[in-house]
Image (cartoon, grey):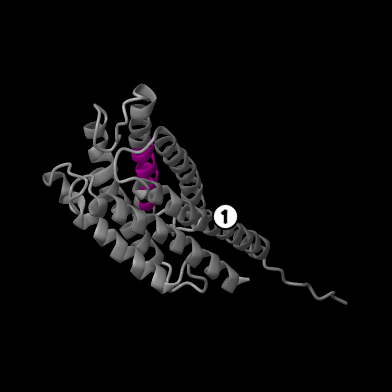
Amino acid sequence: MTTPSTTQNPSAPSQHAADASDLAAATFAGRAGMTVGALGVPMVALYFVYSGPPPEWNVLTRSLLTLVTMAVLTAFGVGLARLLPRDDTGRRTITGQLTVVSLLTYVGVILFATSLEAGTPLAFPDRGMDPTTDGPLAAAMALAHGPIAHLWIAMFLLGFARAARELTTAAAPVVARWTVRGAVVVGVINLLVVPSLYFGMDATHFYAINGWGADAVVGLITVVWIGCIGLGIHRSRKNRT
């Protein structure tokens, strides 16, 4: 008499572990992205508190907020990297690699520019200087805060949109479609302000390299939309549970 054998799927445990890992990464990335959006609002708002040169505490506080925001954005990038598509060999696709590298490069650029910005009140505490327009470091950080940051965050947003679309046929997409469409729009907006380097450094002009529009407003839109991406990832995670 033969005993009937029970057929087991050896891939089931590994698939379950992979799904659990993806859910953990989605939770991590979603919360980090939403935190970036929440921190970005007061960070940018501090640039508009004073019409003239801001006091030292204002510059140092917004610089500290920027450091914290970039730290959380780095964590967001690490979590997002776990969710991006991979090819048949298990390697991340070119689009996925572009997305992650562009985001981390953007973080490095902003940290460099923030270091220069905080350097003005630290070196000249009693001069009443606006570090975005006055002092020897203002011109040095203009390109970093402006066109360089805009171009690299645009590559991130457009790369993310493309990578997310590669997963739209999957049963559990990374984010909702509205998040992907918004990433494309915000990415294009950042590309449109890259030529601001031709329009001088008068911060009162909308399209100046350090202007209130091309720099501050577009920067605010960008960090808020990263928060929306985090929200989209978080909602997608809840739909999979």
Rendered view: 234 above or below 135: below
Image x and y of residue 182, in percent: 35, 67
Left or right of 237, for residue 123: left
Quarter of the image with the C terminus is: bottom right
Total numbered badges shown on the rendered structure: 1
Q: Nearer the viewer, residue 95 or 136?
A: 136
Image x and y of residue 212, in percent: 26, 51
| Other residues around mark 1 within 10 Å, as few (<14) / some (14–19) / many (≥20) | some
Q: Is residue 91 visible?
A: no
Image x and y of residue 27, in percent: 58, 59
The residue that appears at 20% across and 49% down in the rendered structure is 204
Image x and y of residue 95, in percent: 34, 56
Rendered view: 93 above or below 15: above
Disc 1 on helix, strand or loop? Answer: helix
Quadrant in the picture for residue 10: bottom right
Identify the magenta region.
99-111
Q: Is residue 152 visible?
A: yes
Q: Main secondary structure of the magenta part?
A: helix
Disc 1 residue type (three-letter): Phe
The residue that appears at 15% across and 50% down in the rendered structure is 195
The residue furthest right is 1
The residue furthest left is 198
Quarter of the image with the N terminus is: bottom right
Left or right of 96, for residue 81: right
The residue that appears at 29% across and 41% down in the rendered structure is 52
Q: Nearer the viewer, residue 20 or 150?
A: 150
Left or right of 117, for residue 176: right
* Residue matched to label 1: 28
Rendered view: 95 above or below 176: above
Whether residue 228 is in magenta: the answer is no
